[in-house]
Image (tube, grey):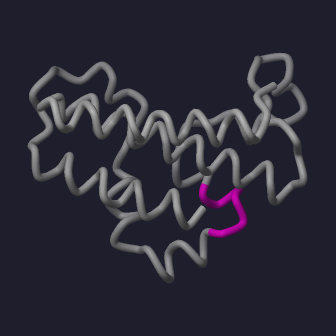
Amino acid sequence: MLSRKDIKKIAKTRLTDARILLNNKRWDGAVYLCGYAIELGLKCKICEILNWQEYPETRSEFNDYRTFKTHNLDVLLHLSGIESHIKANYLSDWSIVAKWKPEARYEPVGKVRLSDAKEMLKATQKLLKAL
């Protein structure tokens, strides 16, 4: 299992990686890593709310927690216990990041525009602070 501390560190690292990619005109990768950072931030929040020290990682660890084995940001937000707070205070940012799907890693390169990547990075930064 991944510890909350490790999850938080990975989320921050992915956000840094996204910034680096954005600055190097790799907008698709930047957007993908922003979504991944939000996913990790939400999983960390779930651990905090449920008083878990770790988040299940492997198939066997998820046996009793099938609902939690997801990459769907809307589901993770709901499970985090702060959905109403995020939607009341950060709805525009959430609307941006909620479009993210893990399957984006299979999208052809060049689909993301600079403006979209900047918008995603900004929204991700705000939401990670709120988590």
**How many numbered marks appear?**
0
Nearer to the camera, 61 or 2? 2
Q: Quadrant of the C terminus?
A: bottom right
Locate residue 58, reporting x and y percent. 76, 18
Displayed quadrant of residue 14 = top left
Locate residue 8, reporting x and y percent. 64, 42
In-image side of 114 versus 74 (left or right): left
Q: In which quarter of the image is the N terminus?
A: top right
Q: Residue lying at the far bottom in this picture: please name it.
A: 88
Displayed quadrant of residue 23 = top left
Query: In the rendered view, would you say 58 is above or below 18?
Result: above
Locate residue 24, reporting x and y percent. 15, 29
Q: Give me the residue at 76% from left, 28% from top.
A: 2
Nearer to the camera, 18 or 47? 18
Displayed quadrant of residue 25 = top left
Q: Main secondary structure of the magenta part?
A: helix
Q: Give me the residue at 17% from left, 50% from top.
A: 116
Image: magenta residue range = 77-82
Q: Is residue 8 shown in magenta?
A: no
Q: Give me the residue at 17% from left, 28% from top.
A: 26
In-image side of 92 versus 11 (left or right): left
Q: Give me the residue at 60% from left, 58% from top.
A: 77
Locate residue 48, reporting x and y percent. 80, 55
